[in-house]
Image (spheres, rainbow, N blue to C red):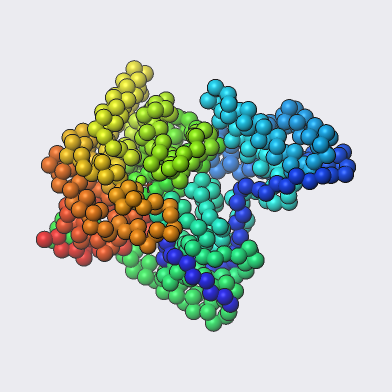
Amino acid sequence: MEQFNGKSIFKGIAIGKILFYSKKQQQVKREKIEDNEAEIARYEAAKAKAIEQLRELCDKAAEEVGETNAAIFEVHTMMLEDEDYTDSVYNMIRKNSVNAEFAVAATGDNFSAMFTEMDDEYFKARAADIKDISDRLIRVLQGQGNTGEIGEEPVILVAEDLAPSETVQMDKSKLLAFVTRFGSSNSHTAILARTMNIPALIGVDIKKEWNGKMAVVDGKQGILLVDPDGTVLKKYEEEKKKEEEAGKLLSQLKGQTDVTVDGRHIKLYANIGSVADVANVLANDAAGIGLFRSEFLYLEKDDYPTEEEQFQVYKTVAQNMAGKKVVIRTMDIGADKQVPYFGMEHEENPAMGYRAIRICLDRVEIFKTQLRALYRASAYGSISIMFPMIISVEEVMQIKKIVEEVKAQLDSVHIAYGDVELGIMIETPAAVMISDLLAKEVDFFSIGTNDLTQYTLAIDRQNAKLDHIYDPHHPAILRMIQMVVDNAHKENCWVGICGELGADVTLIEQFIKMGVDELSVSPSFVLPVRKAIRETKYR
Ligand code: PEP
Ligand code: MG
């Protein structure tokens, strides 16, 4: 048995087999081949296998997410069969006697560059699909399986690093735990692990040879045990049982109110990233959803989600919450949440770059599509809309003007919508400092302590090296929260916290005394926070 230390980002114990997850990017070497025709036959065999994989994926997707969403796999099949693409691969193999992997990689690069340069947004977005089919062919040629494919048995996933776009595509029911070398505790992959309620460790000196070995992840102590002996396994199995019993005790709090000892009521909501998370929200008895990170909808896909697709998602969430409040944040793409089809230029400093509301106010059609979907869905439940990364009153005025245009458009075609509260994220120091002015313009604030800490302390939340000084308890942050609450309440604007700090049970009393009205936390933290609220004396 070997023990490795890491930093825990979600407590809990997982016992199971390790799956070493390799990144999507393949290393492709140029090699000289002897028999060009044999290499072409090898390419043809790989193409047939890739088409077979796509057919299976298409059937699976049609069952799970519907025919419309599954259509992308048909498009990929057509691309694989495209004559120009095939001719290019054949020519490279025949003229230069190169291996099929190299011919595919070069063809993929040339074709995707050609698409990227096109003016038409639709064709621009096809660059990512070309890249995707070329990667698939290379994986087949190199004898690797599908990406994101985990297999039937639930596993402890070990990887160098995981991007949010990779994590969202994984089958969550097959994940026991994450263990990575890189990543920070405030990254979105870490947040996803907390939402999924699975133990996760970062900063572990991982090894490829662990693939298939038994292991224990101890999220409490931040350790990974590879090949544990019988006694250790038994000890952890018992501890896991105890953990489950403690969970049962907490579940007695289901159905209880979120009220302090002396009668102050707090709205206790949950954060989600997909429709699938709603089950977890209901299972943990949250009173609503305080943050739906809608950008994960965009991250899961190879192309812009249509108005209809988005409408179906928002409507399902609203209906499943049966009249309870659902705060949906408009897409916060950018920084660590990149989507290839947005065709964004490389930025030196993406966290302070072209992201979130900045993209929406620049590419207004994308924004309007999302707003139309949100307003249409608002007829089916209690939806509120929140806007991320706000730094000025002018932005809010522009947003409100666009919202009015969208509503007028819906009115003109007699489409009904609900009474939608509008709010903003307070996650920049600028928004804090002008919160008195912003409060006059909106119905609510939700404090995003993850980014607020990053921008206030000038510490990149993704930088694992600085994790130890990334301190959301810093007095600057706590004073800012107080300032925001005071300014908001003067204008009848309610205030929540939806950053990870909201779930910190050591601060619940302080937040309540500050006057915070709402806390929105990962679903698995709802009951521990309820317990803390119910033990707090407000005065
Ligand atoms: C935040 O910044 O605190 C927040 C809730 O948003 P995100 O973590 O998605 O940036
Ligand atoms: Mg944020």
Where is residue 300 shown, x and y percent of the image? Answer: 51, 42
Query: Which residue is painted at 83% across and 39% down in the image?
Result: 97
Question: How far from the left and from the top, in percent, is residue 223?
Answer: 48, 71
Query: Residue shown at 14%/39% (left/top)?
Result: 491
Left or right side of 107 for 285: left
Does residue 357 appear to the left or right of 532 in the view shown? right
Please say whether residue 507 is visible from this viewpoint. yes
Instruction: Name the residue at 77% across, 41% down.
Output: 100
Pick the quarter of the image with the N terminus: bottom right
In the depicted structure, whether residue 392 falls above or below residue 1: above
| Image quarter in which the C terminus is found | bottom left
What's the residue at 60%, 70% (across, down)?
214
Q: Residue furthest front?
A: 348
Q: Nearer the viewer, residue 296 or 221?
A: 221
Q: Is residue 231 above or below residue 302?
A: below
State the image coordinates of residue 63 (x, y, percent, origin top left): 58, 42
278 sits to left or right of 418: right
